[in-house]
Image (cartoon, grey):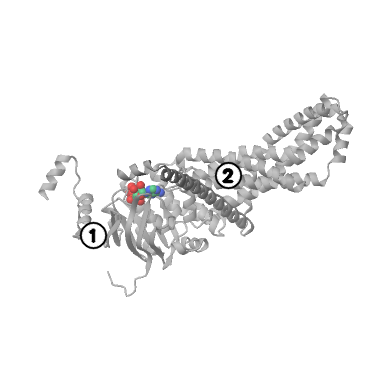
Amino acid sequence: MVDAPQKNIAIELIDVERSFGRQQVLKKVNLAVEEGTTTVIVGASGQGKSVILKHMLGLLKPDRGQVLVYGQDLAKLRKSQLKEVRKDYGVLFQNVALFDSMNVFDNVALPLRERTDASEAEIRANVEEKLALMDLEGVNEKYPAQLSGGMKKRVGLARALVMNPRIVFFDEPTTGLDVSKSNEIYRLFHKTQARLKYTAVIVSHDVPKIFKLADHVALISDGVIEGCMSPEEFQLSDNPTIRTFVRETMGPIYCSEEEERFIHEEA
Amino acid sequence: MPEQDKASKNPAKWLLGTLAKSLERIGAEGLYYLEQVGRMGIFLFACLLNVVRPPYKLFPIVRQIHFIGYRSIFVILFTGTFTGMVLALQGYYTLRKFGSEGLLGSAVALSLLRELGPVIAALMVVGRAGSAICAEIGIMRNSEQIDALDCMAIDPYKYLMVPKFVAGIVSMPMLTFIFNVAGILGGYLIGVSLLGVPGGSYFQEMYRSVDWADVEMGLVKSLVFGLLIIWICAAKGFFLHLERSGGFGAEGVSRATTSAVVLSSVAILVWDYLISAILL
Ligand SMILES: Nc1ncnc2c1ncn2[C@@H]1O[C@H](COP(=O)(O)OP(=O)(O)OP(=O)(O)O)[C@@H](O)[C@H]1O
Ligand SMILES: [Mg+2]
């Protein structure tokens, strides 16, 4: 990688702490996302990945610390300023959060209808294109409740990308997709990112495949970020937490406890 | 534990402790409700601000008028007719005691225009549309759809609330008008066709006694009730996640809907009194 003289930081979390009741989910999270790069957040289930994402979206406010987007502290922005920031966002929630009383087409078309003056024909062309990208032809009239889990994810992705966002946040974009579909989605991310140069923050359990897409990988464990580094560095890191994670997620496929013990001994 | 022993031996201290505790609870309760009132106030302000601020979109408003207004017409006609009928029946027996059955038309019309029309129509709309609005928005809140709107930089106030507020304020007077007409005709049906009050005097007395102030009072009431219903029901759904019980899941929505219906019904009756007292 060429060392650019000035790396523009798109999103920065500084000493973010956040508790829910007595449970402290984020202890001291520091994370910087460079403009135009893809940062992947990994970590075990329930460690606070989605909570980090919600802080970046401004849906949750930190108890202490700051969340900066292009240098602006989200907690200090007025509602209209926050709205301006979010105009650059494309978001896929973990539960997708499609509008369940609208059909697929209207779901994807909504941001275009509400935020642009595009004519209905332009909107149709744009939406059809995005749906085709996600391999979703012929479901325009279906309602979210009539879709499979993976289809919902893809509709959510289409909706997140329809405004050509500058920063995208994907919470588990390929969970629930079959291997070829998720490969397809990864290729698509790669292609669109090369074209649109967006900044991406992706939460995923799909290790190691997601590493192909990542410029930086951050592991969250016990409420702190254990290093934010390139995938190669990540896999070779001697940080014990990262090493445990890498060994567990990228090691051979275990079938039974005995086999597992056997492999551990061998290692 | 020695400290506890000492406390139980000293009744004055114990009394003070309990007193402080209950005061604390009252304070916390008071703060909770104060916070809720403040939130509702800010919510109303934000909604009305967005109503007057461009851009204006007609189609969503028409859709909401269709839902809140048009789809309520049948039930309003029905309840209006029966209200007028029972008014005529009761009024006839009362008026006959004074030998002034001829005034039946004006008695029916005045009760409807000033009081029963706006109130009963509003209560029907609470049951039909208010509960639906609260549940709809509550479910959107619960399933993160409102967060999704926020993240797409679509203002939920502008997108969700404005059409409902405008539709409520526009529909309520019209529904009240329909209710009144149905009631007056229902009263005619009973009073004139069944009880034998002369048909000419029914309407003549009505024309003579009803003046603009009566119509105005009904109009003011229906406007205020329309606003109250949408305000309370929409806010209950919108702030579902801030409910003390947590507002979780289907049960959270059902609880919020129930309290929205109760609260708006009570608010309607209280404001009915206040407006009557002010305008009389
Ligand atoms: N609104 C909330 N109220 C209370 N606790 C919460 C809330 N949101 C998240 N948590 C808690 O924060 C922790 C982290 O949750 P989070 O959803 O971020 O996990 P995650 O890392 O995204 O897990 P997964 O990979 O399973 O999606 C969990 O223990 C969860 O219970
Ligand atoms: Mg998650």
Whether the residue carrying mark 1 lies under 8 Å from ligand 1 is answered with no
The reply to whether residue A151 is visible in this rendering is yes
Does residue A99 appear to the left or right of B1 in the view shown?
right
Residue extending farthest to the left is A266
Q: Circle 2 is placed at which residue position?
A: B233
The reply to whether residue A174 is visible in this rendering is no
Asked if marks 2 and 1 fall on the same chain, the answer is no
**Rendered position, A134 above or below A145:** below
Q: Amino acid at mark 2?
A: Cys
**Residue A126 pos. (x, y %):** 49, 56
**Residue A79 pos. (x, y %):** 51, 60
Residue A55's image quarter? bottom left
Judge the density around disc 1: few (<14), some (14-19), many (≥20) Cα neighbours within 10 Å: many
Q: Amino acid at mark 1?
A: Phe
Q: Calculate the distance from the C-alpha at mark 2 to the C-alpha at mark 1.
A: 51 Å
**Residue B159 pos. (x, y %):** 56, 53
Quadrant that contains the N terminus of chain A: bottom left
Q: Circle 1 is placed at which residue position?
A: A234
Which residue is found at the position 40% from the left and 55% from the top?
A54
State which chain disc 1 sits on. Answer: A
State which chain disc 2 sits on. Answer: B
**Which element carries disc 2, helix, strand or loop?**
helix
**Rendered position, A178 above or below A78:** above
**Which element carries disc 1, helix, strand or loop?**
helix
Q: Nearer the viewer, residue B76 or B234?
A: B234
Does residue B112 appear to the left or right of A246 in the view shown?
right
